[in-house]
Amino acid sequence: MKHTKITQAESPLDRPLTVAFFADRKALKMDDRQVSLRELATENPVARSKDSMGHIKLGKFSGETTPRRSYRHNAAHLEVSGIEGDYDEGTMTVDEAAAALKAADVAAMIYTTPSHLQSGKGHRWRVLCPLSVNTTPEHRTDLLARVNGALGGTLSAESFTSAQSFAFGQVKSQDVPDVRLVEGRYLDQADDLDAGAVGRATPDRGEPDIAADLSDDPFRVSKAVDMLKAAAQRLTDTGTARNEALCREAFLIGGLIANSLLTPEDVADALLPAMVANGYVDDHAGGDMAEVERILNAQLQAGAREPFDPGSAADTFDDDTDDLDDIDAFLDGHVPDPSPEGLTFLTPGQCATQAPRDYLVKRLVAPGQVGCIFGEPGAGKSLIAPALAYAVAQGSEFFGLRTKPGTAFYIACEDEDGMAGRVAALYAEHGSADDFQLVKGVSDLFSPGTIKGKGSPHLESIRKAVKSQRPKLVIIDTLAMAMPGVEENDANGMNRVVQIGKLLARYGAAVIFIHHGTKAEGSTPRGHSVFNGALDFSLMVKAADQGGVIRGVVRKNRNGPPDLDIAFRIGTHHVGADIDGEPIYAPYCEPCDPGASTPIKALPAAAAAALTTLDDLGLGLGEWVPEEEWRDACTDDRQVSASEILKSRQQSFRRQVKILLAADEIEFSEGQYRIPDPFADAFDDAE
């Protein structure tokens, strides 16, 4: 272990630590200082809002910045002078945390965060533990596990991110943080805590299932060998999120080892070369094969708690063997129902004690559910949706709601390049997220396939990707562009959309459609009511008020309350240069304090209908549509006016155009109209 010697102080709380102070979470400004935790405890910088709070990190950074000019990133993280941990579960008080650290004889500083004891938040605090000597970042995880163990394994997963910084100080108009100092040992001198160390939180899988020796069954052995080969091939072909892919494959293979169908040696011989081939050993393990073997063995042991019998499973690793291969049968309801013997009958007492539903986004999204984010054109649907996927990919909070980390597929069915720019803006704002995958090239997910029993070619490709990679979240943006030829006002058409969403969700992912609102008041997603009725949750995005605040309103929620407070503004980041060398800026969702809602005058129903028709014709914001084409579309479908007289419908159209122009909802130039793109300045003619 590489160490930098530091002059020792009498108490660990008085040792001068190297601390990096960042202007805010973006870390575009950095200042290094030598300060002890006892001195730090007396400081209380006050910020206007949570987003503008300064951040701290116990350690040293090189001073090199990312392309986004951030000083805080893993490659620049040189030394660790202390360990930080974040607690957000809400049940452990500061007194209890201090008592636990005192019992472990670990020196620490504890301070509460701005969310502490806020409505629905509970207790929230952070802990800082000094080291006797500076060490390198690769040893941080083991040291943090000591603190986590002393605190009962309650620290958040984000705490284990190497270069993660933490907000420090007070938000103006909120209470002064509660700061505690705990005398004790330096953390790196508390080797006895290794016995109870707890790493990054993983799901509680309960008691292991009972394994069986199936090695005398040639069919099952052959099946297991085929599954191992398929797993090795998938790992060989994996170019992103390789650590997660290895853990996933090894965990499932561990169930085969438990039933004596494979040996650990078989698995190592198959999977380790795959990790060499995909570059993981060199890129992430520094060429240390022993580290890869450690990860592999740990996941095999965890997977062995869930023995797997390939002879009885309808669904395996092999994409050619799938109980959902016949999509037409699934959509027509011809998949056999479970046998009556498989029914479960619960008493009220059993209902009261059954395990709570798991979550992907706490109180909003659960695994295996189908939902929708909808709103009027230009409201911000395609800003909040990628922000949600990014939060899941990082395992970070989404508007104060905890998430379970996992792979997120964002299927961009329109404006792929524009969405790539928005993802780049999220990268600049929040850092890397290898589990976020933008999927391009998809234009038809819901048309019947040309091969009997199959969906469209794009659906088949997505289904296989979902099955093999098992993402936690799949977002389809937008529904209208993914369903050519499917009539959204037809019950059968929208039922097909719902059922295909459920089909993808059967692999454990939450599936979210991005869609427009109804033409009148926009309080439900557009299309036949069968669609809205089948949703597990829906979020309506309301256009920015006069203060520039965009709001998300929960319209349906089977996972929590309907009054979640979601508000954001449009932020921008420089994401590159165009072919002329001029800068390109892209928008992103920037959460903000909800504040007081500014009333927005709703458009008349006829004007809203005309605006939606223009959006449909333009196929996106900023696209010009000839006036004659727009007028004819509005008068033909009679959504603007139901009059039997063509001239009356045309007069109504002209009235709605005046209303929309006065409300700055549309723009006119040389006989053409368009819906202004609120992000046009941000992209600066990037197309």
Image (cartoon, grey):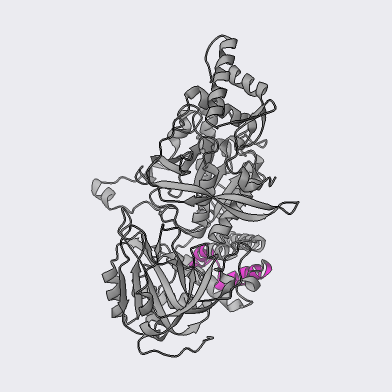
Residue 257: say if magenta.
Answer: yes
- Point 58% across, 35% down: residue: 480
Residue 334 at what x, y percent from top left?
Answer: 51, 35
Taking the image as shown, residue 281 lies to the left or right of residue 192, namely right
Q: Quadrant of residue 180?
A: bottom left
Q: Residue at x 39, y 89 (%)?
A: 9
- Which is nearer the eye, 137 or 322? 137
260 relative to 406, above or below? below
Residue sitting at the far top: 645
Residue at 66% of width from left, 71% of height from top? 276
- Total count of labels: 0
Quadrant of the frame with the C terminus: top right
Q: Nearer the viewer, residue 483 or 64?
A: 64
- Let me know if residue 498 appears in the view: yes
Please, what is the dominant secondary structure of the magenta stretch? Answer: helix
Q: Is residue 406 left or right of residue 560?
A: right
Instruction: Decide: is 320 above or below 282.
Output: above
- Residue 531 place in picture, x, y as percent: 48, 33
Q: Going by the picture, which residue comes out furthest to the right?
A: 580
Q: Is any part of residue 485 visible from this angle?
A: no
Which contiguous range is marked in magenta?
Answer: 250-277
Image coords of residue 168 (percent x, y): 41, 67
Looking at the image, which is closer to me, 273 or 427? 427
Residue 439 at x, y percent in the picture? 62, 49
Query: Which one is nearer the viewer's eye here, 68 or 186?
Result: 68
Residue 433 lies left or right of residue 189; in this view the side is right
Residue 672 drawn in magenta: no
